[in-house]
Amino acid sequence: MTTAILDTLRQAVGAAHVLTDGDLSAYERDWRGRMQGKALAVVRPGSTQEVAAVVKVCAAAGVAIIPQGGNTGLSVGSTPDASGTQVVLSLTRMQAIRAVDADNLTITVEAGCILQNLQQAAQQAGFLFPLSLAAEGSCTIGGNLGANAGGTQVVRYGNARELCLGLEVVTPQGDIWDGLTGLRKDNTGYDLRNLFIGSEGTLGIITAATMKLFPQPVARLTAFAAVPSMQAAVRLLGLAHQHLSAGLTGFEVMGQFALSLVVKHMPQLRVPFAGMDGAPYCVLLENSDSESEAHARQRFESLLELAFEDGCVLDAVVAENLSQAHDLWHVRESIPLAQAQEGLNIKHDISVPTSRIPAFVEHADALLQREIAGVRLVNFGHLGDGNLHYNVQAPEGADGKAFLREQEPRVNALVYDAVAQFGGSFSAEHGVGQLKTPQLQQYESPVALSLMRAIKQALDPQNIMNPGCMLAKD
């Protein structure tokens, strides 16, 4: 039976693109190393028609399919289990830029297109594609849409969902839905596009997408500011909204311990205000303007003057050119890598209403420090849209593996209960994957779970699309 399935898959995509031997860990292990699976085969189709053919083969045999893009996810959403019976369907060969429609401000790309390549294609055409993530050099647009990725510019442009106008999807039966419309208004029945975005490959396989493009900004200004509290950071955000309006492109917050890890592990980087007394947090904010450099700078400097007068900023540096701006952003983007170099940690990708973030942080910090002596809190993230990466590092000198093994369930319960108490979500932009299915069962309402299961059953009655991801196995 297995031999027959593999032979049929080889006929569908070519023998060279059905991998069964050798080291397949790049496909079978998640990016963080939390799970190691075993695939029946890794299949790499080169077209939508080949994806459909693969799905039909698997559906006929009842073989589960694990869709995979760049395999950079943080919630174990694209990793096979250990049974050796699941097919990993890698879309990395499908990288084409199919079309740029300058008049319609859209670009159509295949799902395996690397995000950075999409950004560069947009730039070469004279436009901006604003989705920006730390993993943009390796993550793919199909994965970005599957998890509804966020990143650093959500405050202005929205999540991946808001940037997508149309999709091409292969259904669990192997049919192809061509929804690659570039329309901004189309009220013809249920919104199938939004059903597949954020579904993490559990309802179908995204094979291509039509994405929005934007005019390149004339000016882009970046500042790195030291603030006296999280409440002050939220006040600064309010001032930025008032005085920059739609020009506010990015607003990131970084705790001093997070910055200290960058200083420790990446000494070549200059980290402004690292260790500054009275400044437990720093903020990185960006203003983009479509009018002129002079206009943008005047508004930006006025904002900072008001912030100094208000007391919500203690000190600040403003990038004088794009190179300096890149260096400031590099500090922020280096925090996850610096944290990984410090040792294993317990990650939380949470969202809380921005107005309640200061109270949440005060409560959660005190709770964790009281319950686990010496615990270190790596708090940073996208304050502009209420998304924090509220991570927990083992006490200094402690064994990271032992800390995860002994404390992760307890830490998760403390953090997620606090998130729920403050009206937040345990998953902001990383998705549920296999890692957070227990939390979905615990914190989502029974009505919502019932609707999700009904949708899953209707579209994928065989449960062959990424089983065990998002919704727990029955």
Image (spheres, grey):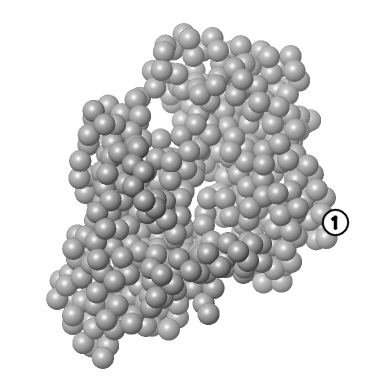
Depth order, front residue of 17/210: 210
Q: Is residue 390 left or right of residue 4?
A: right
Extreme residue in the right direction: 370
Q: Nearer the viewer, residue 189 or 359?
A: 189
Q: Which residue corresponds to mark 1?
A: 370
- What amino acid is found at the position of numbered circle 1 in the picture? Arg
303 over 324 or under it: above or below = above
Judged left or right of residue 8, residue 77 is right
Q: Nearer the viewer, residue 272 or 156?
A: 156
Left or right: 304 as drawn, with respect to 67: right
Give the residue at the far bottom of this rendering. Answer: 1
Q: Is residue 322 above or below residue 106?
A: above
Give the quadrant of residue 358: top right
**Quarter occupied by residue 39:** bottom left
Q: Is residue 146 visible?
A: no
* Residue 102 seen by the camera: yes
Compared with residue 194, is residue 66 higher up or lower down, i.e. above or below?
below
Q: Looking at the figure, which quarter contains the N terminus?
A: bottom left
Residue 380, percent across and down? 63, 43
Q: Residues within 10 Å of mark 1 (few under 14, many from 20)?
A: few
In the picture, measured across the screen, residue 218 lies left or right of residue 333, that is left
Residue 77 image offset from top left, x and y in percent: 47, 64
Q: Residue at x 33, y 80 (%)?
A: 63
Q: Nearer the viewer, residue 189 or 353?
A: 189
Can you give x and y, in whole percent of width and height, for residue 393 in the image?
68, 56
What residue is at 47 percent from the left and 43 percent from the top? 159
* SS state under label 1: helix
Residue beneath the point at 49% across and 31% down: 156
**Toward which corner of the image does residue 107 lie, by quadrant?**
top left
**Residue at position x 24%, y 77% from top?**
57
